[in-house]
Amino acid sequence: MTLTDTILMLAVLVAATSAMLYSRYMPGWTSSTRSAYTSNSPSISLIRLRQGLYNLQAKSRLDARSSVFSRDRCTVQGLILRLHPPLRADDNCETAYIQTSGCRGSCPSYSQVEQRNLTNIFYSCSCCQPIRFTPAVAVLPCRNGQHIRVPFKKVQACACRPCDVNEAPLEIAKLRDLLTKAAVDTPLPIG
């Protein structure tokens, strides 16, 4: 027997016995009120109580299901990326593998009918996103003994944050720019 079933049984027991207790300890009630509680047909308050318990039971089932999904599994994970030299140094410099990090995991999302307007649906979505970075520099070796230094970011911390449809493509574009154009736009330092 689950906790929800136990609560439901306890509430029904209290509802059934409360009519007897009130009629016993409240002698000022009229006989018509007493007969409403002792009749075989359920009273309005008992029907409302059952509806409330049904809603409570449905909500607890939803909470139990969503609690499995609500655990954030968004973590920092290591990545190895292949970094190509800029086009102007493509003949002289080699590709390099850099060790960086990114965010990976699952975050809670749900949708439900709004309580105030039953024709609308409320959506809540969250995505695994980086929240803290540190700068780093990759060094691409060249055949002439020089090196090309390429700046990039390493993810230090991740968290589940609200998804924004407009931000996601922008962040992906920034990451692409960081991995491709940064090497092209960086002057060839001798190092």
Image (tube, rainbow, N blue to C red):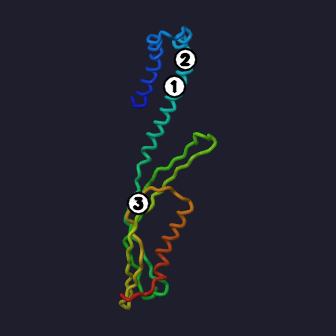
- Of the numbered discs 1 and 2, the one sitting upstream in the chain is 2
Find the distance from the CA under tag 3 to the CA under tag 2.
54 Å
Q: Nearer the viewer, residue 110 or 1?
A: 110
- Point out the residue furthest to the top here: 31
Residue 139 image offset from top left, x and y in percent: 37, 80
**Residue sitting farthest toward the bottom:** 144
Residue 47 appearing in the image: yes
Q: Are marks 1 and 2 in contact (CB under 8 Å)?
A: yes
- The secondary element bearing badge 3 is classed as strand
Q: Amino acid at mark 1?
A: Arg
Question: How packed is label 1: few (under 14 Cα within 10 Å), some, or many (20 or more)?
Answer: some
Name the element at disc 2: loop
Q: Residue at x 56, y 15 (%)?
A: 41
Q: CA distance from mark 1 to mark 3?
A: 44 Å
Cβ–Cβ below 8 Å for labels 1 and 3?
no
| Residue holding disc 1 | 50
Instruction: Look at the picture and state if 40 lies above or below 45.
Output: above
Image vertical order of residue 52 relative to residue 158, above or below: above
**Residue at the (48%, 15%) spot, across then down:** 19
* Amino acid type, callout 3: Cys
Residue 158, numbered circle = 3
- Residue topped by disc 2: 42
> Within 10 angstroms of label 3, few (less than 14), some, or many (20 or more) residues?
many
Which of disc 2 and disc 3 is earlier in sequence? Answer: 2
Neighbourhood count class around disc 2 (C-alpha, 10 Å): few under 14, some 14–19, many 20 upward? few
Image quadrant in which you'd find residue 136: bottom left
Q: Is residue 79 visible?
A: no
State the residue lying farthest toward the front.
28
Q: Amino acid at mark 2?
A: Pro
Quarter of the picture containing the C terminus is bottom left
- The quarter holding residue 189 reads bottom left
Residue 24 on image: x %, y %: 44, 10
